[in-house]
């Protein structure tokens, strides 16, 4: 991360040829840069049509220009936007002029990082910006907007304020042991600590619904060879993603197909048929199938009446037993559902059942949910420290544990953090955001 005293620029619109390309600038030299490119500088926050000129005075383009002086900008710094024509030559010419005037290309996530460092966003909101840009479905969009709007940060700020009050009371008990403090003060503190610990525990015990919605669910389709796994995958995905063959053992590796179910992105896994085999290639495919099924969020265990459904869903994921080839009159006494992916028989019931299970696992209608493993780690640390505080025999040890709990929550919101944590977060952003 280079110094924030630099003035940076980046393309903030999509890559490739377009009618208009947006260039963003931020940093202390944004105003002087505009003076050089398109004198006179536009009125603040008013789009103005300007001729952009290079160092030799040549007109590079006629563009809409916005001058956004800080702190009333996204980054909190002096900023500007150049809406130029999207031709490659125009973009190259304007870029060269900006570099010649002293600006440099931005790093990934540098605009949002500056917004965080200048107090315009907390770390949770900054992450929500990245999630909003990457959202594939409406459910992901809603979750990102809730986090960007501060719903998750408000929960953590509430715990931080309550823990801070507890720590102040604990410090008073340490510093003024001979004062006539109310005898119920310590008991009240312990009750409040237990209440916060319970709330954090309930927040952690959310079935990873926020992370599942953000990352997408995985549905593994398992079963014996030639039971109809590839045909079902193609039907669920709505396109041909897997080779369908009457010969057993056609699928030897795990194939993935991306789709959306109930507003949640889902990866469908077409796995190798589960059976004992002396073929080393097929055996490796069976091993991979078992590993991926064990880590899946939902398992579809297929059979066609020739034997029981085979599944290795050892992770405790919901397992739906599906009898295939229903159009051939296959018995389905031990199955949850009976379908024919060829004729569509029973497919409506299967997709409705999957939609129900997906919504349950990635429900975005409940309280604000954790969306990243980083959040979970910080809150788990806070919960451990609150347990340590409750068990502490000395006031000084309890105070230290409360401070550690505050640090754990602070790392989630970015109030307490290290440069390495910030690098890890903002390196995942796209250039220009």
Image: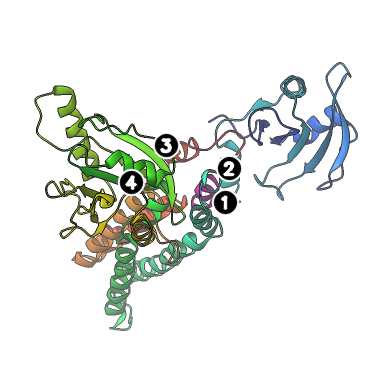
Q: Say which of marks 4 and 2 sits in front.
A: 4
Name the one closer to the observer, 286 or 193. 286
Indicate which disc, 4 or 2, sits on the residue closer to the N terminus.
2
Indicate which disc, 1 or 3, sits on the residue closer to the N terminus.
1
State how far apart marks 2 and 1 are (Cα): 8 Å
Numbered disc 3: secondary structure: helix
Q: Position of residue 133 (x, y in %)?
A: 56, 44
Task: Provide the residue designation for mark 4.
Answer: 218
Which labelled disc corresponds to residue 420? Answer: 3
To which quarter of the image does residue 288 belong? Answer: top left
Q: Left or right: 200 with respect to 430?
A: left
Q: Main secondary structure of the magenta part?
A: helix
Name the residue rendered at 41%, 44% in the picture. 237
Q: Say which of marks 3 and 2 sits in front.
A: 2
Which labelled disc corresponds to residue 121? Answer: 1
Q: Residues within 10 Å of mark 2 (few under 14, many from 20)?
A: many
CB atoms of marks 2 and 1 within 8 Å: yes
Q: Residues within 10 Å of mark 4 (few under 14, many from 20)?
A: many
Indicate which disc, 4 or 1, sits on the residue closer to the N terminus.
1
The residue most toward the front is 328
């Amino acid at each position: 991360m280079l110094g924030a005293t630099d003035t940076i620029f980046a393309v903030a619109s999509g890559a490739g040829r377009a009618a208009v390309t947006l260039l963003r600038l931020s940093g202390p030299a944004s105003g002087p840069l505009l003076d050089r490119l398109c004198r006179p500088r536009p009125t603040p926050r008013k789009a103005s049509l300007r001729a952009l000129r290079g160092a030799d005075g040549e007109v590079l383009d006629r563009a809409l220009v916005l001058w956004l002086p800080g702190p009333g900008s996204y980054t909190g710094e002096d900023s500007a936007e150049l809406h130029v024509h999207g031709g490659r030559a125009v973009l190259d010419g304007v870029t060269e002029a900006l570099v010649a005037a002293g600006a440099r290309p931005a790093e990934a996530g540098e605009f949002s990082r500056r917004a965080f460092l200048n107090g315009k966003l907390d770390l949770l909101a900054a992450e929500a910006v990245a999630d909003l840009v990457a959202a594939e479905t409406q459910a992901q969009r809603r979750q990102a907007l809730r986090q960007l709007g501060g719903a998750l940060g408000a929960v953590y700020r509430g715990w931080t304020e309550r823990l801070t009050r507890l720590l102040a009371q604990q410090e008073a008990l340490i510093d003024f042991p001979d004062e006539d403090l109310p005898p119920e003060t310590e008991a009240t503190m312990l009750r409040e600590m237990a209440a916060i610990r319970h709330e954090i525990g309930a927040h952690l015990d959310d079935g990873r619904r926020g992370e599942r919605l953000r990352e997408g669910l995985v549905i593994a389709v398992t079963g014996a060879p030639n039971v109809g796994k590839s045909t079902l995958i193609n039907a669920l995905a709505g396109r041909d993603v897997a080779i369908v063959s009457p010969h057993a053992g056609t699928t030897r590796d795990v194939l993935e197909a991306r789709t959306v179910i109930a507003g949640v992105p889902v990866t469908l896994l077409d796995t190798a048929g589960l059976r004992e085999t002396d073929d080393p290639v097929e055996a490796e495919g069976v091993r991979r199938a078992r590993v991926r099924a064990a880590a899946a969020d939902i398992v579809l265990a297929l059979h066609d009446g020739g034997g029981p459904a085979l599944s290795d869903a050892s992770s405790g994921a919901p397992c739906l037993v599906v009898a295939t080839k229903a159009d051939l009159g296959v018995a389905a006494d031990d199955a949850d559902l009976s379908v024919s992916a060829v004729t569509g028989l029973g497919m409506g019931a299967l997709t409705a059942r999957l939609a129900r299970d997906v919504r349950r696992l990635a429900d975005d209608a409940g309280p604000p949910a954790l969306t990243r493993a980083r959040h979970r780690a910080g809150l788990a640390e806070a919960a451990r420290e609150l347990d340590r505080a409750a068990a502490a025999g000395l006031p000084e040890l309890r105070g230290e544990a409360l401070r550690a709990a505050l640090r754990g929550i602070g790392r989630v919101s970015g109030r307490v953090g290290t440069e390495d944590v910030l690098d890890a977060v903002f390196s995942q952003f796209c250039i220009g955001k």
